Amino acid sequence: SAVISQKPSRDICQRGTSLTIQCQVDSQVTMMFWYRQQPGQSLTLIATANQGSEATYESGFVIDKFPISRPNLTFSTLTVSNMSPEDSSIYLCSVATGSQETQYFGPGTRLLVL
Amino acid sequence: ELKVEQNPLFLSMQEGKNYTIYCNYSTTSDRLYWYRQDPGKSLESLFVLLSNGAVKQEGRLMASLDTKARLSTLHITAAVHDLSATYFCAAQAGTALIFGKGTTLSVSS
């Protein structure tokens, strides 16, 4: 299993600003992912955070808006840039620890953009 | 493109009765996941199903997978209030998970 922590747990931000979310895992993992869950909705994958190389983004998400860092096998950051109210969501970090195991999710960061 | 559909989206259950949630996916997938989410909380992993015919059970919940029909079911036996939550299925596409819209369960006595 994996224990995942995220910072901040929640934030209220003004439009046009940026917020960086941190994800820390208690063990080394190969795969780290960032998901978004808009209010009352399901989860959508933003990108896969690759250690030592650029993140792989899903359709509809771009690096300029959601830059991601992955400096080592236990840590990643997601930045939400130039925020607008439409970015108000829960942002979740997820990791895959092994081929036979599930994917684990962090507690999420609840973001409200005014 | 892999798509995942769950039904029903809402389920009002009576205590003690049995219910089933269905999860269909559109293309071949390596594995199928079930998660539970309580209001204001993150996702709790319930099951991961790896092969055709896989069946897993935990307490009052039992999940199964039919890869030929591209269908997974989550069966609830003798519903109790503690099971009230939103349940998501997710199918794996490469390394990513594609989620269904979720099924919100409400159990009343």
Image (cartoon, rainbow, N blue to C red):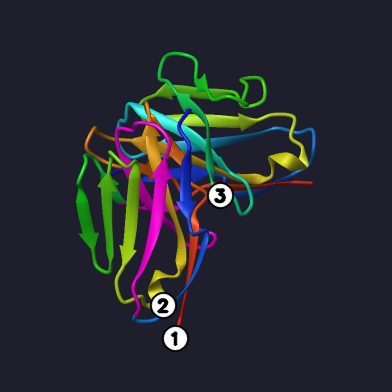
**Span colored in magenta:** B17-46
Question: Residue A22 in the image: x percent, y percent?
Answer: 52, 36
Q: Where on the picture, by quarter, is residue B17?
A: bottom left
**Which residue is rendered at x = 36% and y = 28% of the image?**
A31
Q: Which residue is mark 1?
A: B109
Q: Which residue is mark 3?
A: A9
Q: Earlier in the sequence, mark 1 or mark 2?
A: 2
Whether residues under marks 1 and 3 lie with C-beta atoms below 8 angstroms apart, the answer is: no
In front of the other: B62 or B96: B62
Indicate yes or no whether the magenta region holds residue B34: yes
Establish if B18 lies above or below B46. below
Question: Residue A106 in the image: x percent, y percent?
Answer: 44, 45
Q: Which residue is mark 2?
A: B81
Amino acid residing under circle 3: Ser
Label 1: how many Cα within 10 Å (few below 14, some 14–19, many 20+) = few
Establish if B25 lies above or below B81. above
Which label sits in the foreground, 2 or 3?
2
Which label sits in the foreground, 1 or 3?
1
Secondary structure beneath dot 3 equals: loop
Which chain hosts label 3?
A: A
**Which residue is rendered at x = 69% and y = 39% of the image?**
A87
Q: CA distance from mark 1 to mark 3?
A: 35 Å
Q: CA distance from mark 1 to mark 2?
A: 8 Å
